[in-house]
Structures are given as C-alpha cells and as structure tokens.
Amino acid sequence: MGKYLPVIVTAECGSLTRAAQTLGYTQPSLGYIISNLEEELGAKIFFRSQRGMTLTDVGAQMLQTMRKIEAMETELLEQAQAGQGGLLRLGIFPSVAAQWMPAILAAFREEFPETSIKLEHQRYYLDGEMGVKEHRLDCAFFTGKCPPGLEAFPLYEDRYYLVVSQDSELADLKEVSVEDVAGKYPFIPTNESFDDGSTIREIYQKLSKFSIFDGEPQENQMAVALAEHGLGVTILPGLTLHDLVTSRQVKTIPLKEDFRRYISLLCPKEGERTVATSAFLRLTQQEVARWEQERKIL
C-alpha cells in the first residue's frame, strides 16, 4: 500500500469510517495517517464534519498528483521486490531494543549471515502498523489489537507501574489506584502519554491535566529522574522501567487496575512473509520465552 492511498480512498468514500473498512485499518489509525500527511505537507487536505470527509481546494489539487505518485510507486515496488530478499526491515521501540534485540539479532545472524538488517525506531505504537501495512517494514513490534489483513503473534504482557520518589508518602504502598493519584500529585507526562496507540492513553490524558510541565512530554529517563527528585509521579510499563530504575532512588508501585500493554510481533499473513521474516518471528518467540524464564520485571 502506497503512502497516499489512504487519502485517495478516503476521498473516494467521503467517510473516514467507510475508508477504514475498505483499507482494513481502524478508524483511529486512518485518522492518524491523514493527520500526519497533512502535517508533513503543511496543508489541510480534508474538511472534517459530521457529514464526512470533504476535500479542501488544495486537497483536490493534490489528489491528482497523489494518484500519479501511487501508480508510479506501485510500478517501482514491483521492480524492487526481487531485490528485497537480502534485507530485513524491523520496527522496534526502545524497551524492546534494550531488552530483547541483542539476543534475537545474534540468533538471526547465525542463520542469515548475509542478510542486512535495518532497524527503524518507532516513536509511536501505530508507526509499526503503518509500516507493515505500507510494506515499508517486514515486521514490527506492536501493541494493541491486530489490524485486519495482518497477523500479530503475542510475546509478552507488560504491566504498568506508578513511579514515585523513595521519599514519597506513596512509596510504601503495595499497589495504588489511578484515582488515588489524580489531582493529588503532579503528573510527569511522557511520549506515551500522547500516543494514540497507548493501552492507557485516556488515563494519561486524565492525569496530564495535573502536570507542572504544561503538558510537554518528557523522555522516559528524564521522567524517572524528575520523579526521583519529588517533582511529580509518572506511569510507565515494566519493560521500559527495567533498566531505568536500577540506579534511581525511586519506587515502582503496581496499579490496582492492573493495566497492561500486550506486546506482539506484527507480520504480514503467512503466504506474504519472506523466509527471513518467518525466521525472525520464530527466533523472536524463542528468545523472548527464554528471556522471560531467566529474569523478572521489577
């Protein structure tokens, strides 16, 4: 699927819901793609209303060019397809890169020493879905419900924790509810707080109202450091926290709500996967299972 096909189909359908069904996306995913394209191009492509999606004047002009680009890109991909067997393109996010990728890549290199590996770091969870659907990635680590047309292979259930200073009055609690925190302690938002694909985005948005940082997201390491110095509390998944808290004077407290993100490897369906992609899936499942047996999270 080309970069501009979502815009073309949405224009033809006149509805985000119908276009999402046609393309096999969820409606939030399709809206995410179009918003990113509008930001990238610096122009508003659609008017959005209760009646549907209507092209702006500039959007109507760009649509014709997008159709030409889509046709040329399809031809180009067909020409390049024969040469893709020697390259494996992976979508990863930081916690996976730190905890799992070294062992997985070492095992993969033993089986495919001649295959080049391209790692693409995903800023947002939905980036992996977009990459695999648009054939820019061969597979990607992913959280959430498997989108139509792809397969998601479960790997790990990653629990969320509240991070507080060791001197906090919360530090000795065995677990804590979000309601116990909201409005009572400053919240330190992270990039995950603004990620449409986050399992608990609504919770993050609720807590972000009580931030002293005016809603600006902090990198995970910075957020933990700020919590350590009593400047607020934050919430992050255990896999992310694994290497961030060892040298910090903080406590990680399980949430009573037991929120989790469900990490999987997102791949094309079986008949559409390359040999290298299928091998990477197998090795990932093996190495993550071994990793989970050998160490504990928090």
Image: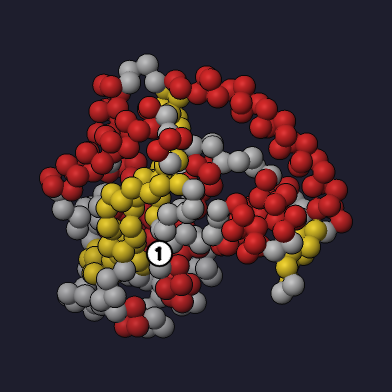
Q: 222 above or below 98?
A: below
The x, y position of residue 19, in whole percent, is 65, 57
Q: Is residue 21 above or below residue 81?
A: below
The single residue placed furthest to the left in the displayed view is 294
Closer to the camera, 195 or 145? 145
Color encoding of the figure = secondary structure
Residue at 45% across, 47% down = 150
Q: Residue placed at 39% from the left, 81% from the top?
A: 182
How many tags in the picture?
1
Identify the residue at the far front of this view: 271
Picture coordinates of residue 132, whole percent (x, y): 50, 42
Q: Can residue 217 be seen from the camera position used here?
A: no
Residue 194 shown left or right of residue 69 in the figure: left
Q: Can residue 274 be seen in the rendering of this structure? A: yes
**Towards the viewer: 241 or 127:** 127
Which quadrant: the C terminus? bottom left
Q: Amino acid at mark 1?
A: Thr
- Helix, strand or loop under label 1: loop
Which residue appears at 58% of the width and 62% of the height?
A: 27
Please rate how many residues cluster around mark 1, counting C-alpha atoms within 10 Å: few if below 14, some from 14 to 19, many from 20. some
Q: Position of residue 161 (x, y in %)?
A: 28, 66
Where on the picture, by quarter, is residue 18? Answer: bottom right
Quadrant of the snapshot with the N terminus: top right
Judging by the rendered image, the residue that carries numbered circle 1 is 199
| The image quarter in which residue 289 lies | top left
Q: Residue at x 63, y 64 (%)?
A: 17
- On the rendered structure, is 24 left or right of 259? right
Q: Nearer the viewer, residue 162 or 97?
A: 97
